[in-house]
Amino acid sequence: MDTVACIKRVPDTGAKLTLTDDEQEIDTSHLGFTISPHEECAVEEAIQVADDHDGTATVMSLGSVDADEQLRTGLAMTADEATLLETDGEEWRPRETAAALADALSADSGTDPEFDLLLFGNESADVANHQVGVRVAERLDMPFVAGVSDLTIEDGIAVAERDVTGGTEVYELDLPAAVGVKEGLNQPRYASMRAKMQARKQSIGRQDPVAGEFDGGIEKVRLEAPESTEGAAEVLGEGPDAVPAVVDLLRDDLEVI
Amino acid sequence: MILSLVEHAGGRPEETSLEALTLARELATATDAALEAVAFGAESAALGEKIGDYGVETLHHVGDERLDTYAPEAWAESIAQLLDATDPEAVVAPGTDRGQEVLAHVGARRDLPMAANCLDVEAGDVYELSRQRWGGSLVEHACLDSDTKLVTVAEHEFSPETAAEPTDTSVQPFEPSLDESAFRVTVDRVEESDETGVSLGEARVVVGGGRGVGDPEDYDKLETLADSLSGTVGASRAAVNEGWRPHDDQIGQTGTKISPDLYVACGISGAVQHMVGCKGADNILAINTDPEAAIMQKADYAVVGDLHEVVPELNDALADER
């Protein structure tokens, strides 16, 4: 059973998001990059399912050549193959992204067409458009469930669970199927140093993405980092000596005792 | 006309759908358009009496008994056919799992762009809108250009408001043509949670532990503190990644978003990923050894100190209070 996990390279944010002067993107000059968190779980699941069912796991990304770093992370986690739909680094919009992924994934595009399970993150960490997975699944005429927190493959069926208030919805999808997964689905493995070294030598398939033409769309104008309303916290004290002040606060001001 | 998707439980509208209706009505009012709604399942007809307060003139009630169970493609296909029949300027849905998923399917089926998790939308030929990125840490100002605009509304960013004058909602059955393939994805069953106690998302007091806790055993101290404040324990992504706590406990962009009266953040640095999840807290008390940690700028109150010393002392003091 072959699997494909679609991933996105995103900044690894720390304590504060700072914008570039033109307010078009996050200033990443002091940041590293990572696989979008939900998608780390998509990669882990793709590998586990392929391992359990004697298939191959592929990681695929649409992005600049820098996204090789994230594809190699996928390979180091022991994905079998990696494909980059290489762009010039401009931010692609969701319809165009979905069209290009579907084109690359579909049988007549020349890539490996045979897969049974297609995994996306529920939404990307950065832009969070919440739609690329659905649009790809529609183009490939595959069933799709978003928000998946647990996944089991049995007898040609994907049993997908989604958390709802007070419980879990269970869906049963005939394979081939597509899912949008959430962090917590599994515990993504850490790649060993040796695996990372080996991944550096593996080849990454490259394709020019085919976007297609769309009327209208959503166009970013600028980004804004909302002002934090508060200044520094009111320091109640240092160490255990602060406890009486904390108790006063909890009792008198916050009334939680 | 502006069309809004209303989710409901047994004919009672969900809070998030009322939020979406509020934004949809603002759009309708600004363009002098009618506000209409669509809802699914036999019980949705009862919504007619509930959403007139929000200014809904017409409820398109899709009562096909197969739709008593949620089926995303069938919902989307119904809405797509309703678009063909009524040609609304926009469809507004709540930014829930279902809302995002269904509207994305509609977008795919009618080749329409969609703007997810909107905070504010200004009507016009092209909509000028703001929407959440990075789980709400950043706002994107964007233009949405489309014949029919698809918009989902960020959850719990504003309170639902009823219309100045209530409307008598006319309930009209809508019968889409749905073949069996539209039901290939459907909720097979619902398994109820056997968890007891307060859920993280609903707790009035949350005690969170981050990397500074250092050891899974030391969460006992936080459990004791949470118990004495009738609260529950959460964790940062760093702590969950260490394997100290299950992902269900994670507070943050890719975990649970909390909105307690008090959040006690212990040994948590205050990364963006985490703060997105706790910005709904009315008050944040940080306990951290590092006075320069980002959390110290974002909390309301702070104790500079080691949680391993401060929390047990606090637990003792709270025991004495009783």
Image: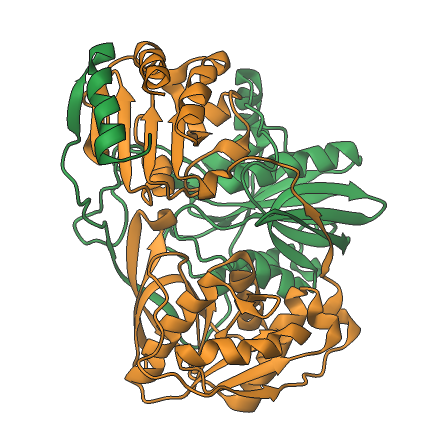
- Residue B236 location (% of width, % of height): 42, 29
Asked where in the image residue A201 lies, by quadrant, the reply is top right
Which quadrant holds the N terminus of chain B?
A: bottom left
Q: How is the image coloured?
A: by chain
Q: Which sits in the foreground, B3 or A3?
A: B3
Depicted B215 relative to depicted A198: above or below: above
Residue most extreme to the right: A155
Total marks placed: 0
- Residue A84 location (% of width, % of height): 52, 46
Residue at image position (47%, 38%) is B200
Residue at image position (22%, 50%) is A226
Depicted B317 relative to depicted B128: above or below: above
Q: Which sits in the foreground, B208 or A153?
A: B208
> Which chain shows up in green?
A
Residue at image position (63%, 29%) is A78
Residue at image position (41%, 24%) is B228
- Residue B285 location (% of width, % of height): 27, 29
Q: Is residue A30 left or right of residue A94?
A: left
Q: Is residue A13 left or right of residue A36?
A: left
Residue A210 visible at all? no
Q: Which hue is chain B drawn in?
A: orange
Asked where in the image residue B39 lies, by quadrant, the reply is bottom right
Depicted B53 relative to depicted B321: above or below: below
- Residue A110 location (% of width, % of height): 67, 55
Residue B105 visible at all? yes
Q: Which sits in the foreground, A18 or B180?
A: B180
Q: Is residue A205 left or right of residue B272?
A: right
Depicted B114 relative to depicted B55: above or below: above
